[in-house]
Amino acid sequence: EPDIIRVEKGKTVPRPSIDPSREGYTFEGWYDNEECEGDEFDFSTPITAKTFVLYAKWSVKLQYYTVIFDLNGGDGDNVSVQIESGSTVEPLKTTPVRSGYVFGGWFLEPEGITPYNFGDAVTTNFTLYAKWTQSFSVIFHLNYEGAPAAMIQEVNLGETPTRPDNPTREGYSFAGWFTDPDFNNPYEFGAVTASIQVYAKWVNNEGAAVYQVEFDLNYSGAPENIIQNVVEAAVINQ
């Protein structure tokens, strides 16, 4: 209910000593029309009407929330942004980095369980955590004087590296990848749990025995068999 004040005709109405309040809104003054248009009411104006109403003008208060991007062990400082209520927050423009790890997105928990949906409206303060997956280097050395630089693959923990195409070397045949330069342990391309150096083994074609390997596709109407000449101890091309 509105407050009613009795004022003698020709006198002024006193301005309330305390401005009204309304949750989620900002009070912007008293007006002499319900639409609250024009200028704010001048309380030095004498009152001449028998009934005179002043209306409170309200504007929606802009509510902002804090979203913290916690790098969770990544390089640099955490980032805090202010987002208007009901709006959406954008991912950081720069992808976080951490030595030895691959960034896996933003999550609601430090453990990286629930990915955050950046299409959701922001209605409270919250923290997003970077998820990291440990990665390792698998380094493929071509292993001869004057060879091109080693091929490096960054592989996530528990994943398997991609087998490179068989390399070539003039006068030699490729004989596989090994985990030691003495070629005692063939590399199996299994799940990666640590960084590893891998070495190419070569067989000198000069004087080496050559064998013929025939691939029979073994169905009616199949193309002709594939025949490869393979140097002894070398790898068959797949």
Image: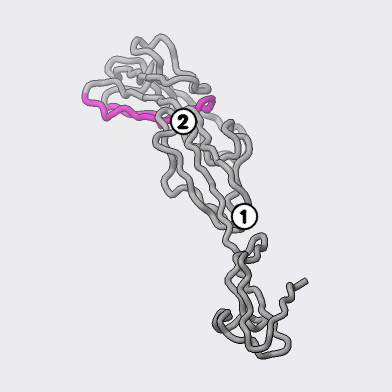
Residue that sits furthest to the right in the current view: 1
Range drawn in magenta: 146-169
- Please tell me whether residue 38 is drawn above or below residue 84 in the rendered image: below
Q: Is residue 27 above or below residue 106?
A: below
Which residue is labeled 2 in the image? Answer: 73
Is residue 84 at all visible to an observer of this figure? yes
Badge 2: residue crowd in 10 Å (few <14, some 14–19, many ≥20): some
Q: Is the magenta stretch mostly helix, strand or loop?
A: loop
Quote the CA–CA distance across marks 2 and 1.
Answer: 27 Å
- Element under disc 1: loop
x, y percent for residue 124? 62, 49
Quarter holding residue 24: bottom right
The residue where tag 1 is placed is 121
Residue occupying the point 54% across, 82% down: 39
**Residue drawn at 65 percent across, 63 percent down:** 21
| 32 sits to left or right of 70 | right
Please check the rendered image and state whether residue 166 is part of the magenta-colored stretch, yes or no. Answer: yes
Q: Nearer the viewer, residue 177 or 121?
A: 121
Task: Residue 207: give x, y in percent of width and height.
Answer: 29, 15
Kind of residue at disc 1: Ala
Name the image quarter holding residue 9: bottom right
